[in-house]
Amino acid sequence: MTLYLKILSFIKPYWKAISAAVLLTFIYVLFNNISLWVTVDFINEIFTKDQSEKVEVVQQDESKDSDKKLLAVIKNAFKSVIIQDNKYDTLLLICLVIFVSFFIKNIALYSKKVILNYVEIKLIVNFRNKLHEKMLHLPLSYFDKRHSGELTSIVFNDVNALKTVLQSSFGKMILSPVQILFNVVLLFIISWELSLLTLIIVPVSTFVIIKIGQSMRRRSRKVFRQIANVMATFQEAISSVRIVKAFTNEQKEINKFYDTNLDYFKKQFRANRLKYATSPINEVLLVLMLVFLLWYGGNLVYANDGLKADDFLYFLVFLFTMFKPIKDLSGINNVLQSGFAAAERVFEILDEEEEVYEKAGAIKIESFSKQIEFTDLNFRYNETEPLVINDVSFTVNKGEMVAFVGHSGSGKTTLVNLLPRFYEPDSGQIVMDGHDIRDLTLHSLRHQMSIVTQDTILFNDTIRANIAYGLEDVSDDEIIDAAKVANAWEFIKKMEKGLDAHIGEKGTRLSGGQKQRLSIARAILKNPAILILDEATSALDTESERLVQQAIDNLLESRTVLVIAHRLSTITNATKIVVMNDGKIEAIGKHNELLSTCETYKKLSQDQIIEV
Ligand code: ADP
Ligand code: MG
């Protein structure tokens, strides 16, 4: 039920438009029925009346039955308007009424469609906006759990499914009930006996519809899950195409995708088979009812027993016009169920816990002025896995450069990621200038630092936009200065378009060292109090490394730096070296001290993991 409420909350802002659509639907059905009624009248006039010029009406339908009074009133009302003294005038008037009814009906239909379509597209756009917004507010740990292809699939395939559902059913969902309601009332007015008989069929077909609908939702859910797998598999093959080729693993990847896709085919086909069964089953049920009514009503008319031939004609016409909406409505259930399956997946993301942006009354720090204390930190990525950070405590003073060393996997990256609160420690705290960082606004906390990582993250945009990312009103001079400090200006200058050069997706048009220097320029331009460098130079060749290293050295002055590095020159300069081993701090000290006191450190430097 909550799912319905959640969907409703999205639709609620458009209640005015939807009310207008409902009103227009009423107008549409009303005029549709008027044109039908008049057509029946017309047929009656043409085929049943004798050739006398004058048509006598008005009182002829005075019924003995009191419950038929309303029917008589309606019939007379129509006849008194339409039937003229002269039958040619009558004909003309009938034609006119039919035309006007159709005209109004179609205007109503068009306006309704436009209004509903507006709401439909708006809803889809809103869903995508909300999802995008949500994704950017989700904690990083969320993205460790889910494949980006799967998330993309939800934002596009599932939301698209919602769109298809809305477009194929929103209009009918309003029209069908209105039309059925209208016609049921009319049918009861025309002959309540026959109407009651008709209703017998309702529970049977409702049961069938609901059963099929339930199964449909289950099957659709599987389809959406599978299409997400297809997308994830595809995306992975494309993004790792270099490796696939290098390991001549094409055939395996092709087979993997083939299997995933085959599975999708099976699931989709199974769902569709069921979907297509609904309409025939219902049609057969409806025809069964209709045939029965024809037989029964026909008998009544022949026996001259309380049912007039023209009443039976009205009855059949309005019953027939109910046929389509009933069929539509039963089909809608299937479509809706598959929509709900998509909506479930969309709301699963929308309901995810966000990063705590602002604790109530969170403090905004303007600057970093004294020290950061890391106290008794413990952290693990998953509850089932061992601690990645185990009882870690140390202090970083302003202006210090603290280096972290340790074997790969010892927890260095994880540790520095706790400072910008990319992950929350399970216990312990980080205190910055006397404030627990959990009491600070995320924005102001992250504003104090820049992070340069081993894998550079660049956008498919110009060099200018990449360096000035996240900053506003930056002059070209400032960008160039930052690029100079980062040793990036040399190569930017040589590019044809300079700062306006596009760097391609993920910066593919640049070398590894150039990308790295761009991201350092970005960090410099932000001019943060705290700089975090996570193996910023480890992937580079000697020449680029030298340039990047110079860039980093330029950065170090007057800043607080946490650096995870391989180069001994960086490390020996550090005020403090933290040696990490298996999530724990093994030793803290200076290079010379550690060489004599810390086995791990000694070994690291000997193994040339720390290179000179
Ligand atoms: P280092 O930077 O020292 O090489 P990391 O901090 O990257 O080490 O990793 C420490 C441990 O945490 C490793 O065992 C690694 O497998 C694990 N780990 C790192 N990132 C994640 C993650 N996002 N999800 C689960 N485990 C992770
Ligand atoms: Mg690391």
Image (spheres, rainbow, N blue to C red):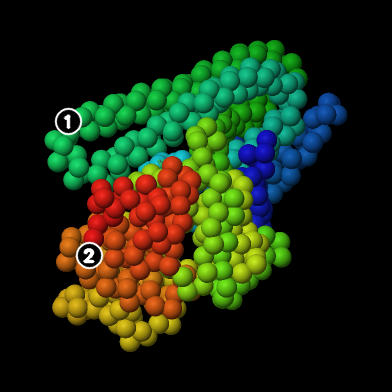
Instruction: Give the SS element for disc 2.
Output: helix
Corner quadrant of residue 517: bottom left
Q: Point out which mark residue 215 bears.
A: none
Looking at the image, which residue is at 64% across and 61% down? 436
Label 2: few (<14), some or many (≥20) within 10 Å?
Answer: many
* Quarter assignment of residue 571: bottom left
Residue 224 is at least partly visible in this image: yes
In the visual, does 131 lie left or right of 590? right
Residue type at mark 2?
Glu
Q: Decide which of 565, 291 is in the foreground and name it.
A: 565
Q: In the displayed structure, does residue 450 sit left or right of residue 283?
A: left
Residue 545: mark in rendering: 2
Residue 84 at what x, y percent from top left? 66, 48
Viewer-side residue, 603 vs 177: 603
Q: Quadrant of the N terminus?
A: top right
**Relative to 232, residue 131 above or below:** below
Residue at numbered disc 1: 251
Q: Is residue 35 left or right of residue 584?
A: right
Mark 1 surroundings within 10 Å by alpha-carbon count, few (fewer than 14), some (14 through 19), many (20 or more)? few
**What whole-number distance in Å separates the C-alpha atoms at marks 1 and 2?**
38 Å
